[in-house]
Amino acid sequence: MRGAAPARFALDSPCGRGHPLRTMAAYQTLEVAREGAVLHVRLNRPEVRNAFDGTVVEELQAAFTAADADAGARIVVLSGNGRSFSAGADLAWMTEQAGLPVAENQRSAERMARMFLAVARCTKPVIGRIHGHALGGGTGLTAAVDIALCTEDCVFGLTEVKLGIVPAVISPFVLQKIGAGRARTLFLTGERFDGREAQRFGLVHRAVPAAELDATVSRTVQELLAAGPCAVASAKQLIATVAGLPIEDAIPVASEWIAALRATPEAKEGFAAFRGKRQPGWMP
């Protein structure tokens, strides 16, 4: 961990690569559209409360891979059309997967896990706009985003045990947000909880009245647009790198990191803009 990896990230940031997407891919289960620097990814199976099946898994991973490659997109907002964000995995699809040969069943589960990883590892900041129901895998998607914003009456639940299974593929993401202590209750009971409790648990950043959700999302978008895009991408990687290190091991990594970043053109522009009392060039 003491090598030059942080410096390589800072000096060759993924935020500087890629090309703006001129056309969006055609999706069966998603709506994907960019408004300026904001890429909107909307789950679009409202008739089943945006429950996900194999197609949703494949398309969500593709959409977030494309978001990484889109140099014109600085922020991703993940939401769901209709009355709910997502009711989790489609039960008919899960039943179908259970009947597959063991190796194929396992590959299907890994594809789903890697879909959540694509959301969590996206180099762009990901905001979750959560409403209605966010059960099972919907709670997992909430945990995978960077900033989850929900309505106070949103219904969450790690309800898998009620079906005789466990929240296995989403467990790494949920545990990072709520910790093992909370999980020992929520994983085992499968109890449901509202947005206020989700905020108290640390699953979401903020729970607000339904009428305030869109305005809260918009304010968060503006805060992110005021930040340097390479710095935001670097911050995401810094957290992933340093979180598991003992303090003594983290110090040299963090020192290399800031030394490399403050020498970048983006940092120099940020310093100059602050001194000159003007907006930095990355502002819209």
Image (cartoon, rainbow, N blue to C red):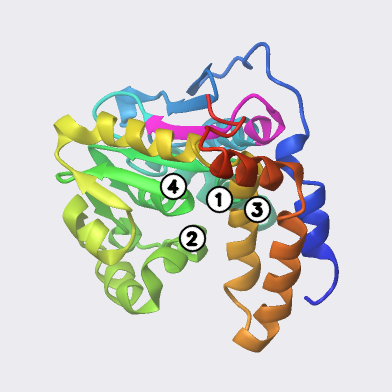
Q: Secondary structure at mark 3?
A: helix
Element assignment for label 1: helix
The residue to which callout 4 is attached is 141
Choose the circle earlier in sequence order: 2 or 4.
4
Q: Earlier in the sequence, mark 1 or mark 4?
A: 1
- Residues at marks 2 and 4, CA–CA distance in whole angstroms: 8 Å
Q: What whole-number distance in Å separates the C-alpha atoms at marks 1 and 4?
A: 9 Å
* Circle 2 residue: 173
Residue stretch rendered in magenta on the structure: 65-79
Residue visible at 67% across and 51% down? Answer: 107
Q: How many marks?
A: 4
> Measured from the top left, where is residue 151 in percent x and y?
21, 41
Between the residue at mark 3 and the residue at mark 2, the CA separation in whole angstroms equals: 20 Å
* Mark 3: few/some/many CA within 10 Å (<14, 14-19, 20+): many
Mark nearer the viewer, 3 or 2: 3
Q: Say what secondary structure mark 4 lies in.
A: helix
In this orientation, does residue 264 appear?
A: yes
Q: Which of the marked residues, 1 or 3, is nearer the chain's N terminus?
A: 1
The answer to whether mark 1 and mark 3 are in CB contact below 8 A is no
Instruction: Give the residue type at disc 2.
Output: Phe
Compared with residue 96, is residue 72 higher up or lower down, i.e. above or below?
above
- Is residue 163 among what the camera can see? no
Q: Which mark is residue 234?
A: 3
Q: Nearer the viewer, residue 130 or 212?
A: 212
Q: Are marks 1 and 2 in contact (CB under 8 Å)?
A: yes
Q: Is residue 88 left or right of residue 34?
A: left
| For marks 4 and 3 on the same chain, the one whose residue lies earlier in the sequence | 4
Q: Label 1 belongs to which residue?
A: 120
In this picture, is 21 found above or below 185? above
